[in-house]
Image (spheres, coloured by chain):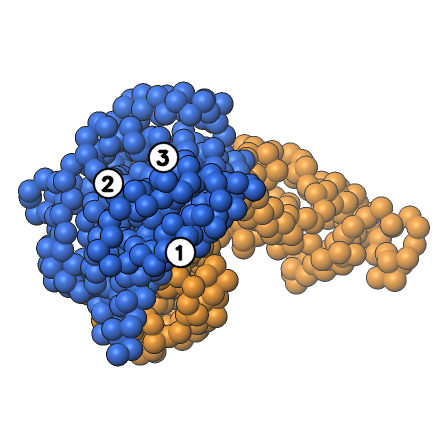
Amino acid sequence: MRKIHLIAMRELKERAKSRSFLLMAALGPLFVLGLIYALFSLGGSEKQHWNVLIMDKTEIMDNKIASKKDPRFTFHFINEFVEYDQFAELEQFQEYDLAVLINEKIISNKQVIVSYRELPSENIQQRLVYHIERRFEEIMVKEFTDLEVSKFREIKQSMSFSFKNTYDPKNEISYKAAWVGYVFGIGILLFVFLFGMTILRGVANEKSNRVVEVLLASVSPRQLLTGKVIGIGITALLQFVLWTTVIAVGLYVFRQTFFPDLLDPTLLVEQMSQDVAQQALDEFALTARSYNDFVDLVYRDIHFTNMLIFFVLFFLGGYFFYGSFFAMIGAAMGSESDGQQYIIPISIVLILSLLSGYYVIYHPETMLAEILGYLPFTSPVIMMIELSKGFSEGTVWQIYLALFILFLSSIILFGVAGRIYKNGILQFGHRLRFGMFLRWLKKT
Amino acid sequence: MLELDGIYKSYYRQRVLEDVSFSIPSGQIVGLLGPNGAGKTTLIRIINQIIEPDKGHVSFHGKMMTSEHLKNIGYLPEERGLYKIMTVEAHALFLGQLRGMAKKDVQKQLDYWLEKFGIQSWRKKRIEELSKGMAQKVQFICTVLHDPDLLILDEPFSGFDPINVDLIREELKEFRAKGKTIILSTHNMKSVEEICDRAILLHEGKKIMEGQIMDVRSEHKEGLFSITFSGNMIAFATALWAGYEIVSKEVINDTTFTVHLKMRGENEFNDLLSTLIPAVKIISAQEVLPSMEDVFMKKINAGKEVENA
């Protein structure tokens, strides 16, 4: 164990100090954060303030809208109607972003038309509707009841309707959630490929610079391979921890600085009258949710703890599984440039694994999807998708079974890799042929 | 100290070693000789437990060799390398600890060797900053760092300049003086003659010769004598007459010559001297023993002739 530990630590030190590791640790998460920021910004890049012209010919609104101002809107009132083309072209209306046409018979027909220069987001639309409806609520209460507005609002009960898919009452079938898992699965495959290639290059490098024979005089080939694979695996986990930390801090900073109101409806409500606070809270919770799907995805939908734990487990399984193939090729290479062609089949399998994830998102109920979930080649991607969608009660065992199969396959394959490594590592100068793998596999 | 008993090894039906047995006592430098492909490296790898023999066993200090014994062996392979981006110190620490040394012992031994070779300034240098010869020195230090009882050196002088070859030779002699055993696999026969006590010759996987260097050379002598004299060459040749055969002559100056000759019949060295003393002034006279290279060539060619026959 001591020797394996020494070899692993040497690998870790060498890799962690390398320029490529530091660059990857610095640029990788920054790239991801940049992407997230761009996606956030796309969702929230609309106008921050809207000038609204309310065309209230009958002056039913009495030039009033709400007891407290909403910073998103400035309302202006005129007691005439303006045609669309006039609103669009006349100089005097250019300062307004929206025009709200209050129908003369609004009390009976409830008709309001809003014309816009730039389509406001659903959130802004809901806010505008909210302000106007509440103003009319005041007018109607005053007109048709003897109640105080505050009293009316106390007795007013809004009903909550919820539409459910009878085949999926818990709304488990969610492409959005599946895509989250897919992104995690891609992350696993990316790390497996990058660090699998590191194993291959490390083994081939030790072989070509002949340091391997010096080492083999002190340690067994299996100890050397195990130490190397563990050392590079720890490097990968370290890289993963750095990525996770930087991205987590970045997301926190985004939430605190760039998008402070992303998910906090109380911020909005504070800006409004206190008497409507509770109701507004309920309503604006909805509007906040619809701010940006991607924001929801990141801050609300991803169960990070679960995802990260299984990410690490499936990464480790996948890394040992695919890493064994990379180690075999590295050990069997006759020279550093030899054997590159054998990387292509592994790359193809990794790409197929990616594609299988895409297939499973859209065909989750098929037999093939189920099989792919247990195959060690594809299970890291498929099970991350399944996990992000959530397992229904009584089916959680599936992920543990997939993990068990993956780790069992990894152990068997690692044993095979160890034998090829042992027999191939001291063979130099040949041109690698497929038959050599079989020959070295048989030899004891 | 080291005993090999009936070692066999084949790779894919091709026999590489066949019934190789020998024992090496402590405090000797043994030359492991043989042409390329004779099986030297395979044999060394078996002693180092890098590969296992198909048959036979290796004993170390009278016990069946196990991986535990590896910490008492220092191995410098022919195809040797170092991690280019590691420093000399990091290398020593890594390899020393793999050989079972404690960190502080590695530091202590490294100090000793760096000082001995006068290369203290290399300690923090990366291997890629060193020349090939410098890296070879570091490799040698890493091999002997744990003060092994048995040193196995495969072509240790390749890549060294003559000064460093001499330095390493002296170190090996010092090791021998301390009672350590050294197996030296090399094609450099001059080194074998100079520092080895014994030689083992492998050819096509079989041991074809073993013995003390002087014994081996004496066994293969051909009755050749070298005489350096001053005087007249004609007088020299006349004096010899038919009892001797001149093989070659070398003119040193107008009156000084070195002649190689063989004796015919029952003549002996004393007879030769008695014959020549009245005719010329003898400066030196000795029996010429074959070099290890000659012995090597002779044995290998003899093996080939047997095969062809």
Give the residue pinned by disc 3: B169
Image coordinates of residue A53 in percent, x first then y, are 79, 48
In the rendered image, which quarter contains the C terminus of chain B?
bottom left
Identify the amino acid type marked 2. Asp
Disc number for residue B293: none
Looking at marks 1 and 3 on the same chain, the residue that comes earlier in the sequence is marked by 3
Q: Quadrant of the N terminus of chain B?
A: top left
Give the letter of the blue chain. Answer: B
Q: Residues within 10 Å of mark 1 (few under 14, many from 20)?
A: some
Tags 1 and 3 in contact by the CB under 8 Å rule?
Answer: no
Name the residue at 13% across, 55% down.
B21
Residue drawn 37% across the image and 75% down it = A434
Q: Name the residue under label 1.
A: B246
Q: Which of B35 and A368 is in front in this view?
A: B35
The residue that appears at 22% across and 27% down in the rendered structure is B178
**Residue A405 on image: x %, y %:** 23, 64
Viewer-side label of 2, 1: 1
Q: Given the image, what chain letter belongs to the residue carrying mark 2?
A: B
Chain identifier for the orange-coloured part of the image: A
Label 2 and label 1: CA atoms lie apart by 33 Å
Label 3: few (<14), some (14–19) or many (≥20) C-alpha neighbours in 10 Å: some
